[in-house]
Amino acid sequence: MTKILEVKDLQIDFATYAGPVHAIRDVSFDLNKGETLAIVGESGSGKSVTVRTVMGLLAPNAKITHGEVLFDGVDILKKSEKQLNDMRGNDVAMIFQDPMTSLDPTMTIGKQVAEPLILHNKISEADALKEAERVLKLVGIKDAGGRLKDYPHQFSGGQRQRIVIAIAIINHPQILLADEPTTALDVTIQAQIIHLLKEIQSKIDTSIIFITHDLGVVAGIADRVAVMYAGKIVEYGTVDEIFYNAQHPYTWGLLEAMPTLETKSDRLYAIPGTPPDLLDPPKGDAFAPRNPYAMAIDLEQQPPFFKISPTHSAATWLLAPGAPKVELPPEIARRHALWASKHPDEKVVN
Amino acid sequence: MAVNKKKALVSVKHLVQTFNAGKKDEVRAIQDISFDIYEGETLGLVGESGSGKTTTGRAIIRLYDPTSGEILYNGQDIAKLKNGSKQMLAFRRNMQMIFQDPYASLNPRMKVKDIIAEGIDIHHLAKDKADRDHQVEQLLEEVGLNADHATRYPHEFSGGQRQRIGIARALAVQPKFIIADEPISALDVSIQAQVVNLLKDIQDRQGLTYLFIAHDLSMVKYISDRIAVMHYGRLVELSSADEVYSHPLHPYTKSLLSAIPVPDPDVERKRIPIPYDASKVEGDNKQRKMVEVYPGHFIFAADDEVAAYKAEAEENHKTPAGTATD
């Protein structure tokens, strides 16, 4: 597999009146060609900031204090604004969360979809509109030719998100960044959009970074998953490793807090407390105060990544040699049992 | 749970809500719906955006003037109460609402204690200032906040905490019935569970009745006793939560359930979404109404469709999968 994107030791602070907020604290990951990487985490965990960095779209008060973002071997962070403009909407494109605000209400959708094509290629407007029509058809807008002169308000939320996707893919980007692209949509429309993204991916062989807090959506779209908490990745692995063999207590908490349609118990598991204030990040493991499995060392020292498999790592002291064996929550024990039945020869961790 | 014998706290009868009636941009948001909400239960109301679920909640609490139909609260028709009348004020104390957006639904320029006590002031529920403060303190504790929070402003709180303030405000006037309109959809997953547990605890302690409006179907199933499914301004199915999820009958409900993403990659790989074509199911001009096709299970059906639904429901309950719901 070829790596198309490598993020190395990224650290980002935001300047605020109260002092620097350490929003991204040492994040590293890579993205392979043609795969979908899901980044999961709650608001404030740094998932959106991470992908905006890849797009070169950080807010003016953001300061990258450390790290590199290598796209095809070249550091994006060192690119000039002009080089970034060449890249955005061409090699790297983004689908935003809210289809109601990410389109220009005063511009016809034909023009909006054709715009990246005209900006990045020597092409006549007529030809660009023809291509726009083709892409709009591809994303499932009915009577695309007849609707090129329509404005965003004449479309439903689901159709608008299809138009946003059309804009993102018209230049066949190598990387598609999708920041909660289905969160604002109904489940039936969400299912259609996810199906559409998969279809497009197989047609134009693009890599996708998909940000979401919905683990159900992750299970359906991701090849690999990175779980973020308080500005760090705490666990990453293949989609099966994360859902059936999760090792970090935060990942456990997320999996437990989602009621499945089978949930019968009287109370839902809720991760106690709230995420830490990143103005003053805790010394040890940021999740320790909310973690029922926390040990003394968690409050003192940040856990390093422990490898579970060549593709799966988790930053928790529970994986350290000599750590006590903990009793898993029932839902996680059920998932680990599924994993064990699929991989009978593997030695059991935890 | 013998729901049939329970007393209906709220009865909606042939409710119609039309906006801009008679004009070119007329919207028929709710088209003749009827249902009961039993005392002490949670009725979940699900549907896509635009299905009319929020309008239904807002019509019941009389944020709108219903176009026609009756809304009985404890047997009294409240659909035609005039705003500002004495009866309306009394009714408003019994029914409260929790809103979707915890950022927009709290006045940023008011202190938390004044937000919570606004209802107490309007209904003259506090003897003096000390009593008012005491009540606010108790309400804050009831929702898992503490007395120190009373003098702060909304911006000092996280989304989950704000939603707790919204719940405390609703509880301040000691209501019997609460309409929660997507109370958790703006919150993070880990916080959603906290708020849902809180709502359940309060219901247990105070014997409240809930109308829980949402589009997150897994959470609705978890919190609701019965579920009503809305589509295009009409109810299409209504039954116990288990029955709706394990034995859905209406094609629209089946389609909706087939689209719920499940946090399990193996299940997701096998997912086959069932499309719903409204023109095929509702396109003919047949008269349809809600029909009870199995005890407690109502379907929006035409006369000639009832037999098929009945047969399907019977068939569903033959399978010995331990699916008895009542």
Image: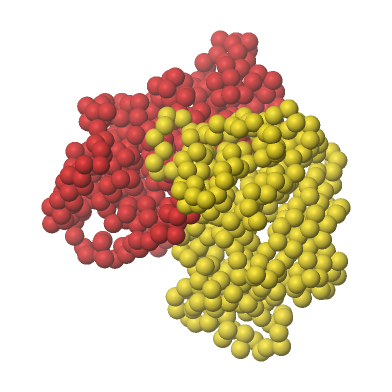
Chain colours: A yellow, B red
**Image position of A275 (left or right of B233):** right
Which residue corresponds to the image point at 56% horizontal and 43% vertical from the top-left?
Answer: A348
The residue positioned farthest toward the front in the image shown: A345
> Does the rendering let one see residue B179?
yes
Q: Nearer the viewer, residue B282 or A78?
A: A78
Which residue corresponds to the image point at 71% horizontal and 84% vertical from the top-left?
Answer: A121
Q: Nearer the viewer, residue B123 or B149?
A: B149
Q: Nearer the viewer, residue B18 or B116?
A: B116
Q: Where is residue B149 drawn, in percent x and y?
A: 67, 24
Residue A83: image quadrant is bottom right
Up the image or down, B57 lies above or below B51; here it is above
Q: Nearer the viewer, residue A282 or B78?
A: A282
Up the image or down, A28 lies above or below A107; here it is above
Q: Quadrant of the C terminus of chain A?
A: top right
**Image position of A11 (left or right of A258):** right
Which residue corresponds to the image point at 44% horizontal and 43% vertical from the top-left?
Answer: A260
**Image position of B169 (left or right of A123):** left
Q: Where is residue A237 drawn, in percent x and y?
A: 62, 53
Residue B27: image quadrant is bottom left
